[in-house]
Amino acid sequence: MSQIGLTQLHQAIRKAFQCIENNQKTWRTVLEECAPLMVSLGNLAQQFIALSKVDLSKTPLHVFPDLEEKLRFKLHHATDTVMNKLNEKLSRLQSVRDAVSSQVTSAFQIQEQFSLDLAVLTERSASAPSVADMMQWLQDADRHYRQQFVKRKALLLTLRPDDFTQMESAPERWKSLDSTKEEVRISDALCRVSFFMESQ
């Protein structure tokens, strides 16, 4: 690889890691904002279930003949509101995924532009990991955000206001998608490239 090619690739790698560092915070923030919304969705499902089990005509509330209809309307409206907010959060997660993917793809395109010498790819220094290692870490981060986005989107697509069982279990299923191990690996990679990032 020519020195110009190596310099360009180093710049692309720096940009990609900077993008990951910036967007990792955004990703975490959005997921934190989603947690109470998922809990709200589960609570609404429980309220729907409770309402369907009660015959209001046999309670003192029978004097309000349209009460059940009004309660159902309010629950549906609240569910729609929560789902809209969750879809907004999903759009933000998609933006993170797209930004990371774009920068990582750019780095790989630059790598492919130049003939790669194995010695250059695997060369390490005190201040920088090898290009091969850094490209692998970028690829791992890109895959993580892609997979996480697809799984979370798929979960939201299973939720329907008339399927209370799915809605009630949504908070636990959403939490089960958390991938702490992968997030730690991304943070670890960012630590490993910190000197490289500063040595531009």
Image (cartoon, rainbow, N blue to C red):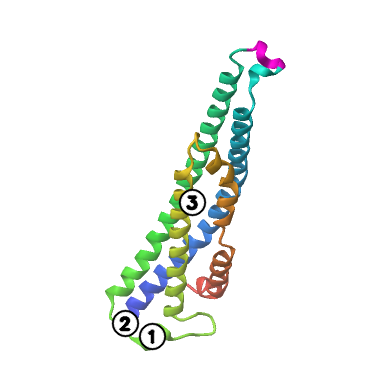
Name the main secondary structure of what is drawn in magenta. helix
Outermost residue to the bottom: 119
In the rendered structure, which segment of residues is drawn in magenta? 60-64
Marks 2,3: beta carbons within 8 A: no
Residue at far top of view = 63
Residue at coordinates 46% horizontally, 78% vertically from top-left? 133
Choose top left, top right, bottom left or bottom right for residue 79: top right
Kindly state the secondary structure of the residue where label 1 is placed.
helix
Q: Are marks 2 and 1 in contact (CB under 8 Å)?
A: yes
Q: Residues within 10 Å of mark 3 (few under 14, many from 20)?
A: some
Place of residue 127 in the rendered image (x, y in percent of width and height, measured from the top left): 53, 80
Name the residue type under label 2. Leu
Above or below, 143 relative to 125: above
Position of residue 5 in the picture relative to residue 86 (left or right):
left
Q: Secondary structure at mark 3?
A: helix
Measure the C-alpha gap from mark 2 to mark 1.
Answer: 7 Å
Q: Mark 3 highlights which residue?
A: 152
**Kind of residue sitting beneath label 3:** Arg
Residue 124's place in the image compared with 167, above or below, is below
Q: Which amino acid is tagged 1? A: Val
Q: Image check: 115 left or right of 23?
A: left
Q: Residue at 51% x, 71% y: name it.
A: 197
Query: Which one is earlier in the sequence, the residue at label 2 or at label 3?
Result: 2
Residue 17 is situated, as x and y percent measured from the top left of the image, at: 48, 66
Write down the residue under mark 1. Answer: 120
Q: Residues within 10 Å of mark 1 (few under 14, many from 20)?
A: some
Q: Position of residue 120 (x, y in %)?
A: 38, 85
Percent position of residue 153, x then y: 45, 49
Does residue 20 show up magenta in the picture?
no
Q: Is residue 53 left or right of residue 89?
A: right
Residue for badge 2 = 116
